[in-house]
Image (spheres, rainbow, N blue to C red):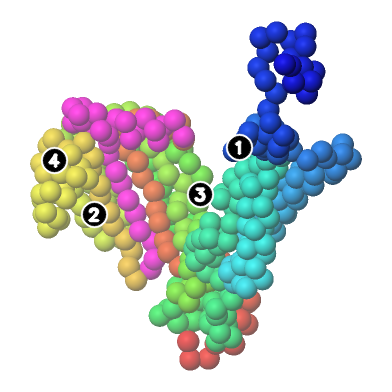
Amino acid sequence: MVDPKRARYIAGAEGAPPLPPPGGYQGARRRDAQPPLFPTAPLVSSTETTAQKQSAGAIGWIALVAAILFALTLLATLFAGGTDLIYGATMLVLQLIVGGTIVAALFSPRGRVLGASALVITLLLNVATVGAMSALQTSASGSYRGQQTAQQRHEAAYPGVQDLSAGEVLAQPSLEEVRAESDAASAEIRQRLSDRFGYTWTQVGPEDLRPERNGYGGESMLVQYISVPWMTNEQIQDYDRKLAVMRVIEDVLVDRGFYGMYSFNEPTSSLDDTILEKFYGTADPYTQHTWEWYTDNYPDPLRFYANVYDLSNDPAGELRAEREADSAKTGEPLEGLQIFFLAPQLLSEADREEFETRMQDYPGY
């Protein structure tokens, strides 16, 4: 006997598995109750996506522009000499703000490239690096006024030189008098040597005037004078000829009120042999590549230097390399005799009246 309930399940379905009992098999779960194999992201509208991209790109641009503006501000402060402003609280706060903006840009996928560029700018130009440059600049020039007292600023403007009284400055020869004397003495020396040895001459460079520091962190009205240097076009390599040249120079200068010539390169100079070897090649004047002789007209300020360069006594080529570098800059001969005068702490006649007026603000200095 066939059960009519089962007949409707198996009719026309020979060999098919039986249907599950009502309620399903024990322990089975419905497919729609299982989590999806690949989770799907919530749908976002194209308008929201565009807004997110624009926001990410805007952070990068903000970081880059902020870094550039901050760097320009630091450079402007540097050129203005504001070392104290660079290290001030305002600059430090601004740098923290710029740094925070850069960090935000680096964490943004679309702002990362611009943020990296801003980071490079900030690493090169920040409070530490620009502040160090400013401190070096102002320290060298004595212009760091942020930490100076009124007394220090007053002393920095001192027109004279520390430990040199106004009376001594005014009593000594002026710049113009020293220049005239050195020019005349140099011309006579060159003429004497040309007449005796047939030397011709090349001007090595121009006259040089350098402001003197006043000893209080500023520049004085006095200058250091270096005359026009001259050099022979001919070599001077023989020991006896070198001595003869120096004696001719000495005769000229002694007649003009200078002392006798003094040799730095001779063993009698009391310099240690290692020092002689370092500056002149050897301790023996016969084999030295450089001679350096000196005299002055103390108590007047004029000083005279005569140097002889002899490359035949330079087997290692150290002097030649130095002379070739000098010749490339000035066009001077590689070897021969070079002469020049030097005088420190000179006041120009044109500045005399102003010097006396300004010194009235410094009684007791």
Q: Please state if 202 lies on the left or on the right of 320 as rendered.
A: right
Please give the range of residues in magenta: 300-329
Q: Are marks 4 and 1 in contact (CB under 8 Å)?
A: no
Q: Element under label 3?
A: loop
Q: Amino acid at mark 3?
A: Glu
Residue that mark 3 sits on: 207
Q: Element under label 2?
A: loop
Where does the image place residue 47, in percent across and percent down from the top left? 89, 40
Q: Residue at x 61, y 67 (%)?
A: 92
Which label is found at residue 26?
1
Which label is found at residue 261?
2
Q: Residue at x 35, y 58 (%)?
A: 303
Dot placed on the residue nearer the N-terminal end, 4 or 1: 1
Q: Please state if 178 lies on the left or on the right of 300 as rendered.
A: right
Q: Amino acid at mark 1?
A: Gln
Residue that mark 4 sits on: 282
Q: Residue at x 19, y 45 (%)?
A: 278
Q: Are marks 2 and 1 in contact (CB under 8 Å)?
A: no
Q: Residue at x 63, y 82 (%)?
A: 357
- Crowd tier of the residue under label 3, counting other residues whose Cα lies within 10 Å: few below 14, some 14–19, many 20 or above: few
Q: CA distance from mark 4 to mark 1?
A: 110 Å
Q: Nearer the viewer, mark 4 or mark 2?
A: 4
Q: CA distance from mark 3 to mark 1?
A: 112 Å
Q: Nearer the viewer, mark 3 or mark 1?
A: 1
Q: CA distance from mark 2 to mark 1?
A: 123 Å
